[in-house]
Image (spheres, helix red, strand yellow):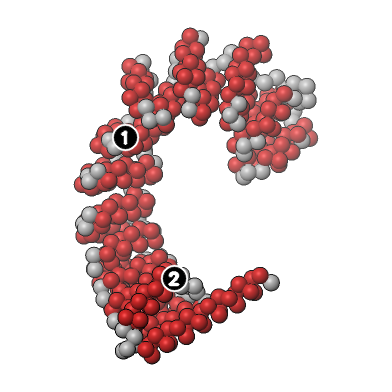
Amino acid sequence: MRRRSLITLIRNYGIASKPKEAIRIFLQINDFGVQRSVRSFNTLRSFNTLLNALVQNKKYDSVHIMFKNSRKRFDIVPNVFTCNILLKALCKKDDVEGAVKVLDEMPSMAMVPNVVSYTTIMGGYVDRGDMVGAKRTFNELLDRGWLPDATTYTVLMDGFCKLGNFIDATKVMDEMEENGVEPNDVTYSVMIEALCKENKSGEALNMISDMLEKKYVPSSGLCCRVIDALCREGKVDKACDLWTILSIKNCTPDNAILSTLIHWLCNEGKIWEARKLFDEFDRGSIPSVLTYNTLIAGMCDKGELCEAGRLWDCMVERGCPPNSFTYNLLIKGSCKKGYANEGIRVLEEMLDKGCPPNESAYSILIKGLCESGCEADISNVLNVVASRKVEIKSDSWKVLVDKFVANRGSTGVTLERILSAKSSIETANSSIETTSAT
């Protein structure tokens, strides 16, 4: 087996969360016919790959054990990359003191700590919230004659941001640019997240623009957080500008970004702008169930049931099956508009399609029927509930009791049917509990 194949195999076992298999392959490496002239180099690379796989699977103690036995048991002389992996493992298990001790011992092992070594220790301090230790390590890096890279500065900025110290984080970024170190995508992400938390959404939007100018693509989650920050500050139009910016830069927004923007547009009552945005996205991409549901929710909330129905039809035609939340939206929208019978029709379709209604669907419909004065239909719904062995929340029963006790003279028969249905439901649920217990 070629050495690259061995390394790939160990790496893939790590990715597959099978650290024991990765160790097994490494221990059997000499059985794979590796040529003696390349065995030492091959084994060291495989060893480092194994340690990385162990860190990836949070087997930090195993990393330390393997490292301690590297010379005696495996005849491997660790290099600086090996030590850096050990430093990462120690910091991940919050043993920063142990990591610092290894750092100090590296020269005695004929190794010179590099930028990655110091940056890893800084990351350990940052995870603890110890910015004094992180800054001290940063200064030590400078004293040793190393030049910090983008990752080093970013770790320091991230630490300050996590503590809410945005001013110091900004100073680090300024220092970084003054020293000719270009921010990377992680640097931008850290600062944009911090700006959003500081309610500086406008500056976050500007920084995303700078990020795109430098050919970095912001993650979907980052864009959603900026949109949320802008909209919470009442800047929905600015949030729409981000959509335009992404489109111009050929960074097609995804369903998560679209759903977030549609939610806020609908929240502001701008349902037709949301629909326009949806159609623009639909021309080049396939909307998800979440995206459809978000827009349908907005339409139902504003009483636009016909438009919600059209979206439903489009959803089905595109092979995007509605889920229980979609049905609940239409039931709730129909009841809110005073069309409780339409809500029953949606419930029936839900059952026909094999999408089991949850407690929420029935409760929404019962309340809607009560408010619409459709007492005669309530017992039918409750009979369905009883047959499906679904539990109805107490607040829904309260609505029913309040409704019929107040009008007991004219609705005695309906109330009697409801109480009978309630008894059936309780009996069915009691039977389920008894069966489960046995």
- Residue at the (38%, 30%) spot, across then down: 164
Could you say which disc has been placed on residue 198 in the image? Answer: 1
Left or right of 93 on screen, residue 355: left
Could you say which disc has been placed on residue 44 in the image? Answer: none
Front position in the image: 193 or 66? 193
Looking at the picture, does residue 352 appear above or below residue 204? Answer: below
Badge 1 amino acid: Glu
Sort mark 2 into few (<14), some (14-19) or many (20+) by Cα contacts within 10 Å.
Answer: few
Q: Mark 2 — residue?
A: 394
- Residue at the (53%, 78%) spot, across then down: 426
- Residue at the (45%, 77%) spot, across then down: 351
Q: Which marked residue is nearer to the observer: mark 1 or mark 2?
A: 2
Front position in the image: 9 or 50? 50
Badge 2 amino acid: Ser
Q: Secondary structure at mark 1?
A: loop
Q: How many marks?
A: 2
Looking at the picture, does residue 75 appear above or below residue 378? Answer: above
Q: Are marks 1 and 2 in contact (CB under 8 Å)?
A: no
Label 1, label 2: how far apart the Cα atoms are: 42 Å
| Residue 170 visible in this rendered orientation of the protein | no
Sort mark 1 into few (<14), some (14-19) or many (20+) by Cα contacts within 10 Å.
Answer: some
Tell me residue 331's x, y (percent). 35, 72
Looking at the picture, does residue 331 appear above or below residue 247? Answer: below
